[in-house]
Structure formats: structure tokens, C-alpha cells
Amino acid sequence: MPHILPSPGRSTRTHLQFFDQYPDISAMRIVGIDTGTANFMYASGSPDLVLCASERYWLELHKLLLLAPAHRYIRECWEKKFDSGQDWIRRCKVLSAYNNLRRGKILNNWDDVATLYCLMAMSGFSYTYKKWQLIGEHAPIEPDYEGIRYWAKSNKGREIEFYRSNIYNFPIGKLDDNSLLYLHLPDHFAHYGCGYSWTRRKLEFISKELNSLAAEGYKICVSALHTRWGRVVNNYSEYFDPQHFVPVLKACEDTDLTEVYLVANL
């Protein structure tokens, strides 16, 4: 499946290798906490997904890309509003409006969500956040319209639910014997989304919660970047109880990095 909603530092690259080792995941409900790109979830083959996120606008982007006419909304916005990526002045005005906290919620319809998607494309989908402010250089990349159309079509038969929640209040009631609780840990402690930050305090909290759930028998998978260019980037596995969590390392074929999947009760 195409990679149409890049979220720097919040996605996996080796999930297909992981699914080869754990094919039964395709028959489970997957409940994702602090959803980023969610490429792990979409690529799993599961017919039942629950996406949880609390950051501003993020679930709206996921919902837009699941609509059949999403590619038309985005193409029209890209060509007319941003002059096919050439209108730098328009980009600055839209970015300024988006970054104005006092303006409140500015996404009122799918047109507004498509505008945000194009704004991200105007930065080449390479961006960071400073609290609620989107930061990115002017490096336009045309949206992949065919990829977006295929994305909506390929996910049409799935049951996908959206919850505005985070690591502190995710819907544990959605978990049963045939469910997998999934979380991807961001690459570094930093601001990753509009109002979303990843901190050591959050890591300590969620690892304690997941250790407790794993001890109760819940199926859990936690993914994270492990090494890059032969050097350890994160030691997240140290926060998870080795009595319940088993580390599974997968190497990315086209880049010199490995990712770790910490699995419990699978």
C-alpha cells in the first residue's frame, strides 16, 4: 500500500517482515494508541481497526484519506489554491492561519482538511512541530493522487473507528481475546504533532500501564526505531518487563536501520 500520510518519526518500515512472523495478527482487531502514520495497522490486513489520537486535526486527516473522492478534493485544492505547489505566498498565509492558536478549530469541512494536507505537501511532508505550530521549509511535492485513490479503495471494506484519546484514556473496553493493543514509540523525545509531544514522563507512564496489561494477559505490540548506522538510537526495551515482553528485531532492507517490536502474549 502507498505511504500517503507521512509522519516523520512516527512510522514503521519493517512491519511487513514482522507480519510474516506473526500472520495471525491479520485476523485480530487492532487498537492503536497515539496513532501516527498507522502504516503498521493499515498494512496488517486486519478488518477491524481502532485509531486513537488526541492531537489537533490528525484523525480528520485519516478520515479524509479514507473517502472515495479524497483524491479529487486534494487535487482541486493543490491546483487551484496552491497553484500546483508554486504559490509560496498563499502557503505562507494558510500556514499563518493554521498556526494561530487563538483562531481555534479551523477545519470545518473536507475542503479545509484537504487544504491542511496540501499545506503538508508544500513542505514535502518533511515538517516538525513547536507545540501547535507546524514548521517546514517550502519544498513542494505533488500529492500522489493515484495512491490516495487506491488507499481509499483498498480500505473500503474495513471497519475503522476513531477515538479522540491518548495514552492516559485509551478505550481499554475495545480489547478482547482477539484484540491487539498497538503503540509506536516516536524516534526521539520531541514535539511531533499539533499539541502532541513525546516525553520521558509519558514513556515511563505508558510502559508501566502496558506492563500491567501484559501481566493480565492482553496481547500487545510496541514498535520503535532501535539502531541507525550501527548505533543504538533508543533503549525503550529497558522500560518493558522481560517476563512478558519479547523483543523482535527487524532490519530495513534499503536503509541501515533496525526496528524493535516488543510483543506480549502473541
Image (spheres, rainbow, N blue to C red):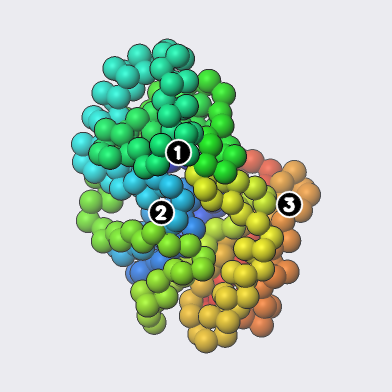
Q: Is mark 3 on a helix, strand or loop?
A: loop
Residue occupied by mark 1: 102
| Residue positioned 65% across, 47% down in the render | 190
Residue 209 position in % (x across, y down):
57, 76
| Residue positioned 39% across, 33% down in the render | 116
Q: Name the kind of residue labelled 2 in the image.
A: Ala
Whether residue 163 can be seen here:
yes
Residue 64 position in % (x across, y down):
29, 42
Inter-mark Cα distance, 3 to 2? 25 Å
Residue occupied by mark 3: 233
Residue occupied by mark 2: 43
In front: label 3 or label 2: 3
Q: Name the kind of residue labelled 3 in the image.
A: Val
Whether residue 20 can be seen here:
no
Residue 98 position in % (x across, y down):
44, 33
On screen, residue 192 above or below 161: above
